[in-house]
Image (cartoon, rainbow, N blue to C red):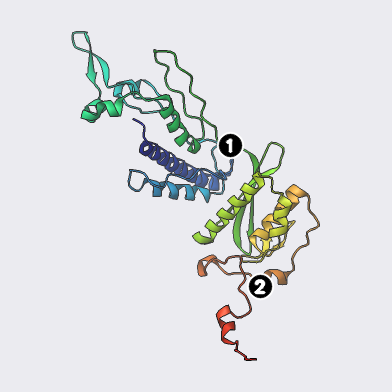
Amino acid sequence: MISDQARAVAAGIAALTRGAAEAESGRIAARAGVREPVALLWPAPPGETPVPGLAAAARAALDAAAGAPGLRHQALVALAPADAVEALLGAETAGIAPAAGATRSLLTASGEAMEVPTRAARRAGPRLAELLGPVTEAAREAMRQAVAPFLHAAPPAPIALPGPARALPKPAPILRRHAGAALHVTVGGHRVVLRTAEDAEGHLLEIAFTLSKEGAAFRSLMDGFAQSVSMGLQREVPLADYVEAFAYTRFGPAGLVEGDPAIPRATSVLDWAFRRLALDYLGRRDLPQPSEADCLGDSVGHAAEMAPLLPLDLPASASPRGRRRSLRVVGI
């Protein structure tokens, strides 16, 4: 039986496995060198599963993987093809396929063949038909769709068994891979990684930020911002519009930029990022550098010593309540 709960468990296990594998690959890459970029976007793991703690562990594993500087390995998570162990146990041990059945063939001491219940069948008890019954092609495809986004290779096809002719299952979607770059700099003493993804013609499709020192709230805000920009770019919003909107925005961290000779100073992370994108994708070399005074007003200390700063300036005038107190009613 393949149910919504079973698909949620499978997706949670796949997400947890991928997050843990990519986080470890990132730690190896930090020592031995980066060979592959971290995925910019992947589907969110299930919000809840029948297995206690699985959903939270999957989210934590993917968050840890997103903070990696890059990957050492090109592919990490895949399903092995099913083999004879499936028939022996009468349950799935690899791949995505229905259970082989409730019995298995066994040769007795006298050389006679007999069918005996599998271990899975003995455990199923009265629910044998429900748990080990035939699985429809639609159910198998739904399970494949649930786990495929977290795999680095398409799930293997089931073993071909004798039986009536049936339509071939549709191939599982392969994870998108785009060209791009990972730019590592420090802005005001804070490490920043800007990752980009491009289409086959070199047009910008996606951006993502990795901030090593900022708080969780600030990182989540930047993640949401990057996803909204990526969605706009994929819907043909001009990059020039984003550059005009976010270049020279002022909020901490700000100050000296190390690692990008073309942009020595920035008034914020977004200022550096969008001026760099303007250089790389629009050829904009007319954007002036901010002065030191422009960068000092919003500079910050160590991120661990203060709360994250949002790109919002508090109004200098009094609040509406304060202004109401100063009003007087004048009769005419």
Left or right: 199 with respect to 160?
right
Amino acid at the residue labelled 2: Gly
Residue at x 51% of width, y 31% of height: 153
Residue at the far bottom in the pictured view: 331
Left or right: 153 with respect to 264?
left
Give the vertical position of 117 relative to 109 (above or below): below
Q: Nearer the viewer, residue 324 or 111?
A: 324
Whether residue 259 appears in this view of the structure is no
Q: CA distance from mark 2 to mark 1?
A: 42 Å
Left or right: 202 with respect to 9?
right
Q: Helix, strand or loop at disc 1? A: loop
Residue at x 74% of width, y 47% of height: 281
**Residue 176 numbered tag:** 1
* Crowd class of label 2 (few under 14; some 14 to 19; many from 20; radius 10 Å): some
Please provide percent x and percent y for residue 328.
60, 89
Q: Name the residue that disc number 2 marks.
A: 297
**Residue 27 numbered tag:** none
Image quarter of the N terminus: top left
Residue at the far right in the pictured view: 286
Residue at x 29% of width, y 29% of height: 131
Q: Indicate the quadrant where residue 175 lies.
A: top right
Amino acid at the residue labelled 1: Arg
Whether residue 309 appears in this view of the structure is yes
Please provide percent x and percent y for residue 269.
64, 60
Please provide percent x and percent y for residue 144.
45, 31
Left or right: 227 with respect to 93?
right
Give the vertical position of 230 relative to 272 (above or below): above
Q: Indicate the quadrant where residue 163 lies.
A: top left
- Say whether disc 2 or disc 1 marks the residue closer to the N-terminus: 1
